[in-house]
Structures are given as C-alpha cells and as structure tokens.
Amino acid sequence: MKILTGNDLGSGDVVWWDGKGWSRDVNDAVDVGDAADTILAAEEAARRVNASYAIAATRTDAGVRPAHIKDRIRALGPTVRLDLSLRPGDADAAKQVI
C-alpha cells in the first residue's frame, strides 16, 4: 500500500491524503498506487500541502500503519507524553509507533 503525507500549509499539521483531500487522521489515508506523483504535484501546485511525499504502509485491523517509524511517529504525534498525542484517550496508542 502506498499513501501520501505532508504538512497542511495553513496549520502545519501532519496530514494524510484521503482520496479527495487531506485528513489529520492516518486511518483516513487511501492507497494511491501509481498515482502518487500526479496527486502530489497537483496538491503542491494548489498550495494545499507542503513537503509531501509517498510512503509504504499496511492496513491492519487496527488501522493504517506506516512502514517507517518516522511516519508512525508523525501519525501519532508527540511520543514523550501520550496525553499530547492525537489519541490521548487511547491506552494502546503507543503500540502504533512500536
């Protein structure tokens, strides 16, 4: 599975391509297959996203899991305090990164 990530130009938030736009939730990410470069070029040209790139991921029963730890951390948020993460009430959130 290949998904897209970047940073929202307005807020700086980490965002994930959901097939129609950008979402803050990695679980909304869709497989873009061979269309990654085309989508990224159009979105950057429209100035909706910055520093966007394609990554490998898998979809599990728990949701979308980026293959690289850097992107798993980007998906969750700060790892030093889970109460500041994107899933503060999820006791199993740390398992998403590790």
Image (spheres, grey):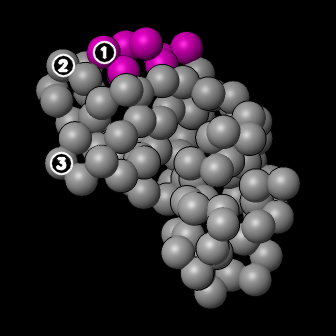
Residue drawn 68% across and 81% down?
90
Residue drawn 64% across and 75% down?
82
Q: Nearer the viewer, mark 2 or mark 3?
A: 3
Tell me where the magenta segment starts and ends, as one range: 34-41
* Label 1–label 3 contact, CB within 8 A: no
**Neighbour tally class for label 1: few under 14, some 14-19, many 20 plus, Cα within 10 Å:** few
Determine which quarter of the picture holds residue 48. top left
Locate residue 72, reporting x and y percent.
67, 47
Mark 1–mark 3 distance (CA, rounded to whole Å)? 18 Å
* Label 2–label 3 contact, CB within 8 A: no
Say which label, 1 or 3, has the lower sequence index.
3
**Neighbour tally class for label 2: few under 14, some 14-19, many 20 plus, Cα within 10 Å:** few
Residue drawn 47% across and 17% down?
35
Q: Nearer the viewer, mark 1 or mark 3?
A: 3
Vertical order, 29 against 28 (above or below): above
Q: How many marks?
A: 3
Vertical order, 5 against 2 (above or below): below
**Neighbour tally class for label 3: few under 14, some 14-19, many 20 plus, Cα within 10 Å:** few
Locate residue 85, reporting x and y percent.
56, 70
**Is residue 66 visible from the viewing direction of this image?**
no
Mark 1–mark 2 distance (CA, rounded to whole Å)? 6 Å
Which three-letter amino acid code belongs to the residue tagged 1? Answer: Ala
Answer with left or right where residue 44 lies relative to residue 59: left
Q: Secondary structure at mark 1?
A: helix
- Residue 35 magenta: yes
Identify residue for label 2: 45
Identify residue for label 3: 10
Locate residue 66, reporting x and y percent.
69, 41
